[in-house]
Amino acid sequence: MTRNITFILLSYNNATTILEALDCAFRQTHHSLDIVVSDDCSTDGSFALIKRRIARDRGPHNVRAVRNSSNLGIVGNINAAVAHAQGDLLVIAAGDDRSHPERVTLLVERWEAAGSPTACVLYSDVTPIDSAGRPVEGWSERVARPPWTLERLAEGKTGPLGAGCAITRRLLTEPTPISPSVVHEDRVFAFRARLLGGEVLFIDHELVQYRIHGGISRLASANKMTELTTAAKTRLGRVIADARQRLADARSARAPKRIIERCRQVVAEQEAMLAMASGKQILTHALEAVRGDARASRMAMHLLRFARARFFQ
């Protein structure tokens, strides 16, 4: 059975790379591809570049470009794009990455081979590239592999890399709407897929050239105490919204008690570690967390990190 497939290209201040990303979308070998380019209120002229390129050459595909009137963030921009999408499966690409011409074709083949589940995340391996588009040697990270259990995804420590993902439309709305505050949408989509009885499927091919900009998660702290305070505030401020979303999803979907409990523990632990990142009343915050939902072992481990940073650095 032929399915409608949408390639969603997300743009935000990508003037130096968006045309390259758009050309990659046009070169996709999948037939009759629906392409939606959603610009999240860029201020660098990205949308004008997009419009000119589409007017000049769009290839054999159905292409539409839309621009948000205000900046909506990653989740808001995806939702804005999906409002214009026709596809049952949504292949997502960033405006600074490059997709292999066979990316959509291979993802669709894998999806259909699995029976086209309505709750599904598909993702591939990636090739890291730098700001100039050159391969990055010795990349310290690695795209995480299956298996993906609910317990593993509830922890939120790892998940499919969003840059290589495709999702089914259902995951945007079920079991609850996704909060605009969510930053790591890939950690939410994968959890939802398994929560709804669906699949998280991996293709062991490098189908995306993934641009490494030295983001927050990759910046080394100047010292261990800075890592536990200043850097932790930034990191935890970004991931707590994801953990809260997973907890809300687990409750709404009436997940097994052990999964809801794990989600509660993760939220409590992250909130405690964020409070501890102030560097004040560290022991008090840890004990209060343990009296709540946090795991004593996790809080003890975090206290040990502070002790080592303070006395052994």
Image: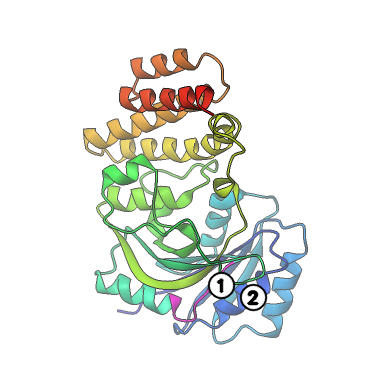
Q: Where does the N terminus fall, quadrant-wise?
A: bottom left
User: Where is mark 1, residue-wise?
Assistant: 98
Distance from Cα at disc 1 to Cα at disc 2: 7 Å
Task: Tell me which residue sits at (56%, 20%) in the image.
Answer: 279
Task: Tell me which residue sits at (70%, 79%) in the image.
Answer: 53
Task: For mark 2, give the secondary structure.
Answer: helix
User: Where is mark 2, residue-wise?
Assistant: 20
- Residue 187 colored magenta? no
Examine the image and state in which quarter residue 231 appears.
top right
Q: Where does the C terminus fall, quadrant-wise?
A: top right
Residue 215 screen position, x and y as percent: 60, 51
Q: Which kind of residue does numbered mark 2 sit on?
A: Glu
Left or right: residue 308 compared with residue 280: left
Q: Residue lying at the far front in this picture: please name it.
A: 312
Left or right: residue 10 compared with residue 13: left
Q: Is residue 311 above or below residue 207?
A: above
Q: Is residue 64 above or below residue 186?
A: below
Q: Which residues are magenta?
A: 97-103
Task: For mark 1, give the secondary structure.
Answer: strand
Residue 68 screen position, x and y as percent: 66, 56
Q: Which kind of residue does numbered mark 1 sit on?
A: Arg
- Disc 1: CA contacts within 10 A as few (<14), some (14-19) or many (>=20): many
Q: Is residue 44 above or below residue 74?
A: below
Q: Is residue 191 among the parts visible in the rendering? A: yes
Residue 10 screen position, x and y as percent: 59, 62
